[in-house]
Image (cartoon, rainbow, N blue to C red):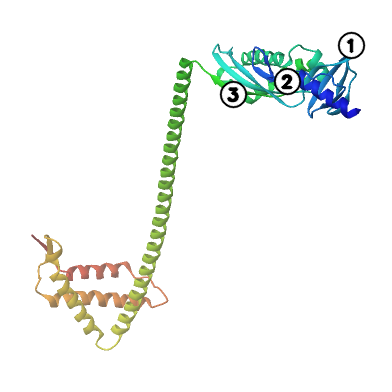
Amino acid sequence: MLRTVLRSGGALLKHSQRTVPGLWVTPVQQRWASSLPMNTVVLFVPQQEAWVVERMGRFHRILEPGLNFLIPILDRIRYVQSLKEIVIDVPEQSAVSLDNVTLQIDGVLYLRILDPFKASYGVEDPEYAVTQLAQTTMRSELGKLTLDKVFRERESLNSNIVHSINQASDEWGIRCLRYEIKDIHVPPRVKESMQMQVEAERKKRATVLESEGTRESAINVAEGRKQAQILASEGQKTEQINKAAGEASAVLAKAEAKAKAIKLLSEALTKQNGNAAASLSVAEQYVAAFSNLAKESNTIILPSNTGDISSMVTQAMTIYSTLAKQSHSRGDTVAAEVPQGRLDEEKAQAENLAPQPTPHQ
């Protein structure tokens, strides 16, 4: 019996359905939807669908996916709602930004039916209502932003539109999941102005980067010169210190050598025939000095008896003997005063013995 009822119900359902799906036309889109199923007592509801049932014209219940039983004639399937996520293409529309620029914007709306009862009885066409609400909300949100902020704050604009849609669509049993702006079309003149602005901004950045590079280069060059001068001055300082130390060492070495030479000379003069050796040395120095007079300068001063070498040697030895007597009379360790008259006498004697110079050119 049950098999017969099921076969008859399936045949009635098959003949009651249209061979071609009906076209559901809305102002914003065209959507294909199957016709409403007939009450065949035993019904199988597909997954992710909700069938709204009315009993004698009044809401009775919502059929869950799977096997369901209805009373013939009294129960009628009035609405079929899909619980899947629905994608709606929002058509292109005009909007004016805060700085009075007209934009052409279109988007995509993602929504889902959460309450089939509200979606069926709360609004006549839920998808059309949500689409119109998305368009009006988009225009109002764009009017709060300038053209530059529309491109920068695209994500925040989408979230604001979703929030505004959800505030109104809660009564319809629909939840807006997200909204995405697909394209933003700018007028040609505004687009050219934006391109010129971008080029100017890039030139500005290039100029700033070039100036910063020049500044860094100048700073590096100045820093290098400063370091070079510091190193050069330190090198000169070290060189002068080393040179002064070398000169001081040389002076000390010369002084020590001269002291040793004087000591050896004094010891040699105290020995036998020391005066003869001193006379020979003075004579040799006189001849050497006389031979170098004409080499160093064009103007020379010669004594009157230039050729009398013996007199010059005698004069030098007399001075030496006088100084030796004075040194011997004073001693090595005890110094005694010499009468001023004696010093004057010895000085006069030395002056008388000295030859008178005669200028020659």
N-term-proximal mark, 3 vs 1: 1
Quarter of the image with the N terminus is top right
Q: In this view, does 269 lie above or below 181?
A: below
Q: Position of residue 13 (x, y in %)?
A: 79, 21
Can you give x and y, in whole percent of width and height, for residue 357 in the image? 13, 64
Residue 121, given in percent of the width and then of the height, sits at 81, 13
Disc ID at residue 182:
3
Residue 297 vs residue 142, the one in the foreground: 142
Disc 3 packing (10 Å; few <14; some 14–19; many ≥20): few
Query: Which amino acid, mark 1?
Result: Met
**The C terminus: image quadrant:** bottom left
Element type at mark 3: strand
Secondary structure beneath dot 2 equals loop
Q: How far apart are marks 3 and 2 (CA)?
A: 30 Å
Q: Distance between the residues labelled 3 and 1?
A: 46 Å
Specify the label residue 56 is tagged with.
Answer: 1
Asked if marks 3 and 1 touch (Cβ < 8 Å), the reply is: no
Q: What residue type is labelled 3?
A: Lys
Where is residue 117 drawn, in percent x and y?
A: 83, 17
Q: In this orientation, does residue 329 appear? A: yes
Q: Nearer the viewer, residue 236 or 282?
A: 236
Name the residue located 19 percent from the left edge and 75 percent from the top edge: 285
Query: Tag 2: Cα neighbours inside 10 Å, few (<14), some, or many (≥20)?
Result: few
Q: Which mark is residue 34?
A: 2
Mark nearer the N terminus (2 vs 1): 2
